[in-house]
Image: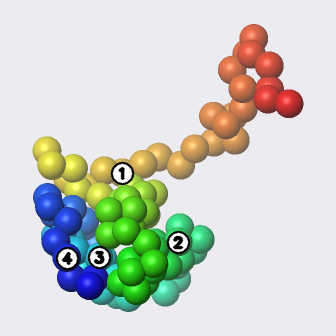
Amino acid sequence: MGTMKTGVPLKVSLDGHVEEIDSVSDAADFLQRWPIERRGHVYRSALNACSAAIAAQMSQSDAMKVFTGFARVAGILVEASGPAMMLEPRSVQSRMPKQGRQAPK
């Protein structure tokens, strides 16, 4: 069940090697090879989503959305136009309300 193709392949780059992920099984295989020292909460969410989709407890589409989010956060997502999208770390200030706005209560 986890081998269903998802349509347009997602491209990720790890150590300069670009890989196409076009099924939940591909995503799960990629996650199994992810460096242990870089495994955190977002990684575990992606792995759990892929496992749930393979077990038919979650849709393939939703699992791939979670994997795509993981790829974005990890900075390994390759945009259609070029190299991996690198995200700059957000500062504490960027999470603070803008001046003149009230913080949510």
Q: Secondary structure at mark 4?
A: loop
Identify the disc placed on residue 24.
3
Disc 3 versus disc 1: distance between alpha carbons? 23 Å
Amino acid type indicated by mark 2: Ser
Image x and y of residue 96, in percent: 72, 32
Identify the disc placed on residue 72.
none
Amino acid type indicated by mark 1: Met
Camera sees residue 74 = no
Q: Quadrant of the C terminus?
A: top right
**Dot 2 alpha-carbon crowd within 10 angstroms: few under 14, some 14 to 19, many 20 or more:** some
Report if the CB atoms under discs 2 and 1 are less than 8 Å apart.
Answer: no
Disc 1 versus disc 4: distance between alpha carbons? 29 Å
User: N-terminal of the two: label 4 or label 2?
Assistant: 4
Image x and y of residue 40, in percent: 57, 74
Q: Residue at x 35, y 84 (%)?
A: 54
Report if the CB atoms under discs 1 and 4 are less than 8 Å apart.
Answer: no
Q: Residue at x 43, y 72 (%)?
A: 58
Point out the frontmost of discs 4 and 2: 4
Point out the frontmost of discs 2 and 1: 2
Identify the disc placed on residue 45.
2
Front residue of this view, candidates 29 and 15: 29
Front residue of this view, candidates 89 and 47: 47
Disc 2 versus disc 1: distance between alpha carbons? 21 Å
Reading the image, the residue beneath label 1 is 86
Front residue of this view, candidates 84 and 68: 68
Reading the image, the residue beneath label 4 is 4
Amino acid type indicated by mark 3: Val
Disc 3 versus disc 2: distance between alpha carbons? 14 Å
Report if the CB atoms under discs 3 and 1 are less than 8 Å apart.
Answer: no
User: N-terminal of the two: label 3 or label 4?
Assistant: 4
Report if the CB atoms under discs 3 and 4 are less than 8 Å apart.
Answer: yes
